[in-house]
Image (tube, helix red, strand yellow):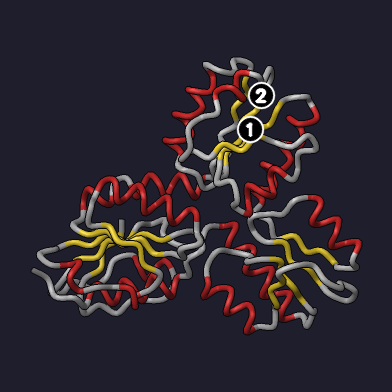
Amino acid sequence: MRKTHANSKAASGAAGRAKLKAGPGLVVRVAKSAGFCFGVKRAIRIARDLAASGAEVRMLGDIVHNEQVIRGLEAAGIRKLRRLGRGRGRTLLIRAHGAPDRQIRAARRRGYRIVDATCPMVREIHRLVRRMDRSGRRVIVMGDRKHDEVVGIVGRCRRGALVLDLKEPLPEKKLRRIRRAAIVVQSTQNEAEALAAVEAIRALAPDLKFFNTICRPTRMKQQEVRILPLETDVVLVIGSRTSANTRRLYEIARSLNRRTHWIQSAAGLRRAWFRNARTVGVTAGASTPEEIIRGVVEAAARLPGP
C-alpha cells in the first residue's frame, strides 16, 4: 500500500501515489493495483492513435466502462454508435470487452475496417471456448448475463453457451443434463464466489473442465481490497457505476468494512463519511483514470483528522 498525508503535493502517474510528505490530517492509503489495467491502457492507446491518424472512427458501445474516458475519445473525434450503419470508409473499433463474431461479420459486410482493441486476456477466453465448443463440451460462462464481455464470449460458441450469474441460484436441472462441460469465468468476477460455484457444479456435472479465466489484474485488485478495509477506517472505491469490476471491489470492501463508499470522482466525497476517522483506504476499478484517483487522494488528504 502507498501512504499520503494532508498538504502533500501529488506527483503525476502511479509513482505519484508512492510515498509523500507527512502532514496533519487523514492518512490516505492507496492500493498499488488501483486504476487502469493493461487491457484498458492498450484499448485507449489504440483508440487515441486511430483518432490522431485522421481515420473516421466509430465504436459500437463504450470501448471501456468509464464516462470520462469516453468523453475524451469523443472529443478526439471518435463517435459512439448505437447500431451499425454505413461503414464504407470508416473504421470500427472493437471494445476492450470484445464482441460476438456475428457482430464483427455484420460490420465487415457493411464496409467497416475492423480494428480489434479486445483485451488479449479476453481474446484468450474466446480461443478457449471455441476449442471446447468444437470438442463437443457444453460451454458454461460464469458472469453477468448482459455484460459486454459475456456477450462476446457466448458469441464465440457455435452451439451457444449456458450463462451462470453467480448472484442467482444454480440451475441444477440444467446442469445435471450436461454430460461434458467446460467452465470459463468472466475475467472480472469475484474469484472466491466463482471457485465456490465450481465445486457445487462438480457434484452435478462430474465430467467437467474448469478454466480459471479471471485475469491477473482482477486477482491483484481483489487480494488488496480484502486487506485494505481491515487496516483503514474508511474505504473509497473509485469507478463508474457501469463498471462490473468496480462493483465487485465495492462489494468485497463493503462486506469487510461498512464505512465503504463507491464514488466516481472527488465530487462525490462527503465530509460526514470521515467523522472520527484517521485512515482512508483508496482503490479504483480497471477503467478509472489516474487523474481521477489523484483528485480523490488529494481531496481526502486535505480533510481534517479526528
Task: Give the residue at x 90% y 74%.
Answer: 88
Q: Position of residue 29 (x, y in %)?
A: 27, 61
Image vertical order of residue 149 relative to residue 210, above or below: below
Viewed as shown, does residue 8 lie left or right of 166?
left
Name the residue nearer the viewer: 15 or 234. 234
Viewed as shown, does residue 267 lie left or right of 53?
left
How many numbered marks are there? 2
Q: Position of residue 97 (x, y in %)?
A: 64, 55
The answer to whether the residue labelled 2 contacts the one labelled 1, judged by CB atoms less than 8 Å apart, is yes
Give the CA separation, mark 2 to mark 1. 7 Å
Give the residue type at disc 2: Ala
Label 1: state its secondary structure. strand
- In the drawing, what numbered circle is on residue 140? 1
Task: Give the residue at x 86% y 73%.
Answer: 86
Give the residue type at disc 1: Ile
| First of labels 2, 1 by sequence position | 1
Image vertical order of residue 74 relative to residue 242, above or below: below
Label 2: state its secondary structure. strand
Packing grade of label 2 (10 A; few <14, some 14-19, many >=20) is: many
Most distant residue in the front direction? 173
Task: Give the residue at x 64% y 65%.
Answer: 63
- In the drawing, what numbered circle is on residue 181? 2
Q: Position of residue 226 (x, y in %)?
A: 32, 45
- In the drawing, what numbered circle is on residue 25? none
